[in-house]
Image (tube, helix red, strand yellow):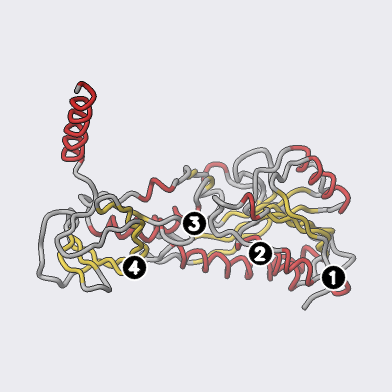
Amino acid sequence: MLDSTSLNKDAPRIAVAGSVSFTRVTLEGLLRHHANVVGVLGLSDSAAANVSDYARMDDLARSAGIPYADFTSINDPAIVDLVRSWSPDILFVIGSQLVRKELMSVPRRGCVSFHPTALPRGRGRAPVAWLTWDGIPGAATFFQIDEGVDTGPILVQESFPVGKTATSTQVVEEVRAAIGRALDRWVPRLNAGEWKPEPQDESKATYNSKRTEKDGLIDWRLPATEIDRLIRTAGRPYPGAYTFAGDSKVIIWRAEIDRKSPHRGVIGRVLEADGESFLVQTGDGLLRLREIEILGTRKIIAGTTLGYSVEDEIYELRRRIAELEAQLKR
């Protein structure tokens, strides 16, 4: 257990704000190297419903004797005043809301953020999901916030591998480990007063757009390799890839390509169901579903067709509408 007496009082005064596991690992690294952390902000449980990989940090702060406060809006005037009272040199903002100019101007040196790609490549939204989708290496990158999107000068960068068949869960674990290595290299120098942000090379910049829960919808006409890729990308800590079985939504958390089964069938049809796995025909190849979650009462058995036939569904809706119109006339 750390306490405030173990902190390096001659090091820069640091405040930390955020609400995901990357924030927590960062705070752990700062404390491990006895950084002078003077305050911690965490997103309130009441505001965290839509935050993937949500993590609290009040226990870490309190065990180290560091002031802690919850927030629902990081730019709330009361929160800005609180951070100002801590008189930080640096404010780490990781996995939190966007910081506006008033709060950004409080720390004397500046605000530091984090991105898990090799900036300037991969700026923007959903970086872990896109790394998983692409199957390319990432990097734990701490950078100084400026007015752009992930455009500020880099303070430290630590690469990590991403396998071609990695899941988002596995990539998150690689990011956490890389954060630890990056902080082990950087924080001792930071404690000693070093501050050497290096500008990014704009000629190499690329951007990723956001991903939403609905991007996890499975099109069974696609090849098994592409559907498997989507399942690995949309899986935990994200909402999951999904399909439908009748009136039930089916979330698919884990699957694998089956290259040995002699079966073939109609696209989207469950060909085998043994209680532990479900073999499904795709547009090209077979996919064995290893972990599913059914939101509803529908049971999935051999012969079940996953997904909807748009024409059939439209026909059925038109038929029911016609019946209701006829009843209203009567």
Q: Amino acid at mark 2?
A: Arg
Q: Secondary structure at mark 1?
A: loop
Tag 2 or tag 4, which sits nearer the N-term? 2
Q: Which residue is mark 4?
A: 291
Q: Which residue is mark 1?
A: 7
Nearest to viewer (mark 4 / mark 2): 4
Density class for disc 4 (Cα within 10 Å; few <14, some 14-19, many ≥20) is few
C-beta proximity under 8 Å, tags 3 and 4: no
Q: Which residue is mark 3?
A: 128
**Between 67 and 312, the one nearer to me in the picture:** 312
**Between 130 and 249, the one nearer to me in the picture:** 249
What's the distance in space between the residues labelled 1 and 4, CA to CA? 45 Å
Question: In the rendering, at what x and y percent does residue 279 appear?
Answer: 20, 66
Q: Residue furthest bottom?
A: 1
What's the distance in space between the residues labelled 3 and 2, CA to CA? 17 Å
Tag 2 or tag 3, which sits nearer the N-term? 2
Is 210 situated above or below 243? above
Q: Which residue is mark 2?
A: 24
Question: In the rendering, at what x and y percent does residue 118 appear?
Answer: 54, 55
